[in-house]
Amino acid sequence: MDADIIVIGASPAGLMAARNACEKGAAVLILEKKEKIGSPPHPANSFFKGMLDKCGEKADPSYVVHYLKGMKIISPSGRTVEVEAPGYAIDKTAFDRFYAEKVMKTGVDLRTGVKVQDIQKEGDKFTVNTSAGVFTSKLVIISDGINSKIASLVGLKTMKHPEDIAWGIELDIRSPGLGKPKMFEYYIGNHAPGWKTTYSPRGGDNAAIGAYVRRCGPDATPYLNAWVENFKKLKGLEELEVVRKLSGGDPIVTLPKEYIADGIMVVGGAAGQSGIGYAMRAGQICGDVAANAISKGDVSKSSLLAYQKDWRKEFLAEHYLGRIGLETLRKMTDREIDEMAKVFEKEDLSFIHGSSVEQAMQVFAFMLKKKPSAILKCRAFLRNR
């Protein structure tokens, strides 16, 4: 065989799965369809320290282009809720290559420019047919991102709510001083149904703006165009230099469904696991379980269920809370969003800490104390739309 484990896709989740499996003694081969790692990158240019803490990694200066102090959540009428949290604007291509290089140093065989076309089970091995020939392994990890077709080839429906993939377009832009602020800006409301528009300072004159929507089809162009014009007005800009345009999807509230079969594991965006740090941690869990299965000589579904069990223990509640939150937001009117933002505007929110469940309870307790009627706005979740 060519490897104990073949990983399809050098996504952050796939790289972590490969690294952890290799460190536990498995022979791992990654097949990546892009000719060069991280080129073009996925539209994900910022994250916060808490997200990276999920997978025990630390931000590296080699890919950080600007350090952030936190975020502003801005309602339709301009009410602003500030959340202090260390964050990073990143060069996503440099980020992907940083981790690819780290993974290869552990002994993983990473091959680029290889497009996987089919997977077949033949006895106790898998045959992976690709543009570069045929490869064989005992186990396959699918980690080729939100647009994955490989999981469906093996009969897995990986997302409970695929209709809720968020489709987004991001522009790298340039204007004098635009990248100097230290706060990420997150605009919510029905101008971006289901999620957000964003402004991410990237240092100096560089920034990124984006529009991310749900249940509006895969083309977010109309929402981006409207956001560009509104953004220029908000910042007093006559023109913007557009440096680059990126597009893609995010499984933000799709929820994982089927991501394990005999000899098959799915991880990251392909499995409906959203967020860089969360997906990387899922990859670590996946890689550990995969390596253990190889060492035991048992890659059956029952042997791989530890991956599902451990992932659910760490992240299921968080993903469900995220879905409830964004579905409530999608169904709320702009006026309701403004009224909710008013509760938190100009408040010190440093008391919010702990797990996602603990944070949710703290937020609800604060709302009950300051304005109990605000809780009623959450009834929007029950609306049939």
Image: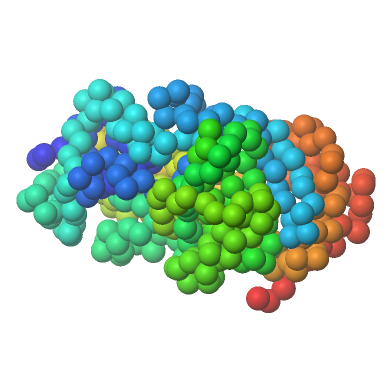
> Residue 189: percent from the left, percent from the top?
69, 62
View extreme (left): residue: 133
Would you say residue 96 is visible in this rendering? yes
Q: Is residue 3 above or below residue 302?
A: above
**Residue 82 sits in which quadrant?**
top right
> For this view, does 54 lie left or right of residue 303?
right
Which residue corresponds to the image point at 79% horizontal and 32% vertical from the top-left? Answer: 351
Residue 290 rendering spot, x and y as whole percentages: 31, 38
184 over 64 or under it: above or below = below
Give the quadrant of residue 147: bottom left
Q: Is residue 313 left or right of residue 35?
A: right
Q: Residue furthest front?
A: 238
Which residue is at 48% across, 31% downward? 65
The quadrant of the image that shows the C terminus is bottom right
What residue do we see at 47% from left, 58% from top?
A: 169
- Examine the rendered structure and indicate whether residue 22 appears above or below residue 268: above
**Residue 369 x %, y %:** 92, 45
**Residue pictured at 53% horizontal, 33% vertical:** 204
How many numbered markers are drawn? Answer: 0
15 or 245: nearer the viewer: 245
Front position in the image: 216 or 365: 216
Q: Can residue 21 be spotted in the picture?
A: no
Residue 294: x %, y % from top left? 25, 36
**Colour convention:** rainbow
Please identify the quadrant where the N terminus is shown.
top left
